[in-house]
């Protein structure tokens, strides 16, 4: 039973549970609270496409899918959940329970255990940290429950891992940086959360590109944790230490915004330090358009709907089209890469970006 958690059903707010997380529950009825993102705006609806309507899983009247989300501290994460709700809203008799892992391995592990004990028919997991959530994934598989892993992988058995290639995305962004810098200069790298598979892969993409540009030096690398505040602290220290910085390669837009604030605080806006970032929000695309960012790796959060469809297919015993064996246990569905957003194509991509939040003000403008 999910404790201490708030569940939003079609007509009421329910409370249950035993962890400090929160849960948002949506039913496949198209209700206002559970309908999620406008389905027609999602970018990957042709992948594992499925007709509207009820899904037959052994004649069950209600199918419950548990979704253990990393945390809700970042709009990219909440938008992923909204895309999952959009899929659920298309199928009568399907219920989605979403648990907030509070960006904590122990909390998220407890959430997964609660979803298992509550009788979830399938579980979607987007782990806060890859290795740390492997035992939780093992428990799901041991319970013979289909496990769909989104965005960040776990190095253990699962039914399916779904994600874009973080390495390829970062490689393309880094190539743009190299071109803009004519292959020469000094850069800083602000990573995502250390130990998470996207951070590892984005670093790998950068380094693969830099093998082709020996004239570019990485001055320092720091953990930005995907959010703004750690990047401010890192940049405060680096701006004190380094007098000559040409560019910042950030794994996340939030880190780039934090770095720019630190640059402004230090009175170094006139140095025109370049920014190369990732995550694909509409406000960041606007920063690319006006030249505040030079490039943004286009990484969509709208993959929750694919996760729901994969879970329903697995429950029906269907094979997953396009799924392949890969270096980790289980199978992977590799999503197509989206183009790097640069000033030349930013206007085209702004309407396709995620995030309804207001564009941050550039403190150096």
Image (tube, rainbow, N blue to C red):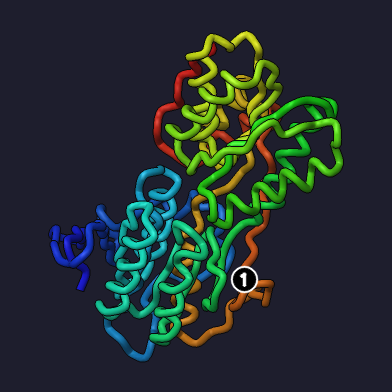
Circle 1 SS class: strand
Question: In screen coordinates, is 359 left or right of 322?
Answer: left
Using the image as rendered, state which of residue 344 and residue 99 is in the foreground. Answer: 99
Q: Is residue 168 visible?
A: yes
Provide the residue designation for mark 1: 332
- For the residue carrying disc 1, how many other residues have a C-alpha within 10 Å: few (<14), some (14-19), or many (20+)? many
Using the image as rendered, state which of residue 70 and residue 225 is in the foreground. Answer: 225
Q: Is residue 28 visible?
A: no
- Count of numbered circles on the image: 1
* Residue at x-position 58% and y-position 20%: 239
Quick one: which residue is furthest to the bottom in this view?
58
Question: In screen coordinates, is 287 left or right of 213?
Answer: left
* Residue at x-position 53% and y-position 84%: 318
Decide: is 274 above or below 151: above
* Residue at x-position 33% and y-position 53%: 102
Quick one: which residue is furthest to the front in this view?
241
- Residue 120 quadrant: bottom left
* Residue at x-position 50% and y-position 73%: 310
> x and y percent of residue 194 in the render?
53, 50
Decide: is 122 above or below 285: below
- Residue 328 quadrant: bottom right
> x and y percent of residue 226 in the render?
49, 42
> x and y percent of residue 4 in the render?
17, 61
Decide: is 216 above or below 262: below
Q: Could you tell me which quadrant the N terminus lies in? A: bottom left
Q: Could you tell me which quadrant the C terminus lies in? A: top right
- Residue 19 quadrant: bottom left
> x and y percent of residue 320 in the render?
58, 77
């Amino acid at each position: 039973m999910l404790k201490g958690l708030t569940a939003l059903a079609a007509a009421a707010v329910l409370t249950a549970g035993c962890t400090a997380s929160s849960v948002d529950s949506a039913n496949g009825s198209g209700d206002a609270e559970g309908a999620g993102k406008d389905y027609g705006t999602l970018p990957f609806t042709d992948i594992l496409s499925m007709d509207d309507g009820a899904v037959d899983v052994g004649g069950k009247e209600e199918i419950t899918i548990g979704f253990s989300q990393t945390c809700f501290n970042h709009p990219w994460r909440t938008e992923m959940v909204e895309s999952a709700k959009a899929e659920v809203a298309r199928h009568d008799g399907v219920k989605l329970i979403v648990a907030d892992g509070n960006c904590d391995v122990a909390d998220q592990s407890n959430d997964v255990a609660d979803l298992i004990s509550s009788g979830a028919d399938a579980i979607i997991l987007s782990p806060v940290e890859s290795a740390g959530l492997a035992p939780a994934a093992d428990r799901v598989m041991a319970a013979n429950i289909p496990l769909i892993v989104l965005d960040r992988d776990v190095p253990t058995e699962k039914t399916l891992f779904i994600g874009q290639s973080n390495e390829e995305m970062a490689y393309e962004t880094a190539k743009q940086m190299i071109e803009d810098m004519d292959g020469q200069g000094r850069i800083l790298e602000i990573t995502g959360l250390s130990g998470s598979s996207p951070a590892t892969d984005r670093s790998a993409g950068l380094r693969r590109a830099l093998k082709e540009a020996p004239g570019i030096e990485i001055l320092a690398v720091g953990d930005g944790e995907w959010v703004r505040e750690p990047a401010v602290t890192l940049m405060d220290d680096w701006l004190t230490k380094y007098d000559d910085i040409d560019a910042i390669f950030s794994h996340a837009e939030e880190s780039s915004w934090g770095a720019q604030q630190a640059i402004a605080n230090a009175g170094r806006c006139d140095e025109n330090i370049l920014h190369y970032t990732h995550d694909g929000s509409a406000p960041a695309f606007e920063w690319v358009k006006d030249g505040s960012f030079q490039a943004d790796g286009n990484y969509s959060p709208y993959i929750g709907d694919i996760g729901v469809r994969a879970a329903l297919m697995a429950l029906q015993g269907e094979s997953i089209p396009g799924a392949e064996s890969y270096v980790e246990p289980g199978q992977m569905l590799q999503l197509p890469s989206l183009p790097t957003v640069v000033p030349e194509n930013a206007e085209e991509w702004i309407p396709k970006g995620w995030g309804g939040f207001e564009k941050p003000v550039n403190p150096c403008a």
